[in-house]
Amino acid sequence: AAGAATCTACAAGKTSNALHTACTDCTAGTASFTAGSPTCQSCPVGSYQDTPGSSLCTSCAAGTYAGTTGLNSCIACAAGTFSVVGASSCSPCPDGYISAAGASECTACALGKTSNTAHTSCVNCDTGKFAGVVGSPSCLTCPAGTYRDTPGGSSCVACAAGTYNSSTGQS
């Protein structure tokens, strides 16, 4: 104020304008955390702020991320990846697991299946191969003396008495 003997602190979520004659809202993607803050701070990685004049940043929800500072929204994880709350990036699903876009966790593939390379869908094991555990990272080759004649098997079938095969991966 004109002729004032002291200056008044701007409230949290605001900072003074260039001439120090008024307080202005921090822009989206930034915040001032305390009253009288000299500047608005960019929200750190893993968080965002979508409301001008805010005194806090919000952690990104699971399934989203903020990889740079000063964002006004978080970005959904791509299919085949996942994230936890406050993530600065998404992590790939391990082999044998899949996810849709925006996932907070990956889902294990069923018996007889493994994930495709992108970790976006589960695929049957080929004939001559099997996946005997849920979330199998790969399909294993049937050993000699066994076979698998249909895709998607969780085990191999032993050759009947009086028959044999000396090769692995037989269908």
Image (cartoon, rainbow, N blue to C red):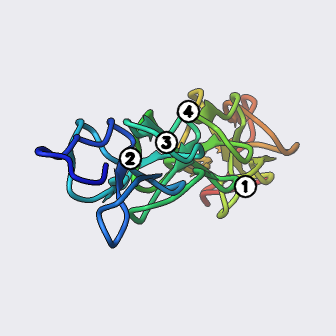
- In the rendered image of this protein, does residue 8 appear above or below residue 71? above
* Upstream in sequence: badge 2 or badge 3: 2
* Upstream in sequence: badge 3 or badge 4: 3
* Upstream in sequence: badge 4 or badge 2: 2
Q: Residue at x 56, y 28 (%)?
A: 133
| Element marked by disc 2 | strand
Q: Amino acid at mark 4?
A: Glu
Q: Which residue is mark 4?
A: 105
Of badges 2 and 1, the one in the foreground is: 2
Q: Amino acid at mark 3?
A: Ser
Q: Amino acid at mark 1?
A: Gln
Instruction: Indicate the position of residue 158 as horizontal and vertical percent values.
Output: 68, 32
Q: How far apart are labels 3 and 4 at the CA level?
A: 7 Å
Q: Amino acid at mark 2?
A: Lys
Q: Which residue is mark 2?
A: 14
Q: Residues within 10 Å of mark 1 (few under 14, many from 20)?
A: some
* Upstream in sequence: badge 2 or badge 1: 2
Of badges 4 and 2, the one in the foreground is: 2
Residues marked 3 and 4 touching at CB (< 8 Å): no
Q: How far apart are labels 1 and 4 at the CA level?
A: 36 Å
Q: Which residue is mark 3?
A: 83
| Element marked by disc 3 | loop
Observer-nearest residue: 162 or 66? 66
Of badges 3 and 1, the one in the foreground is: 3
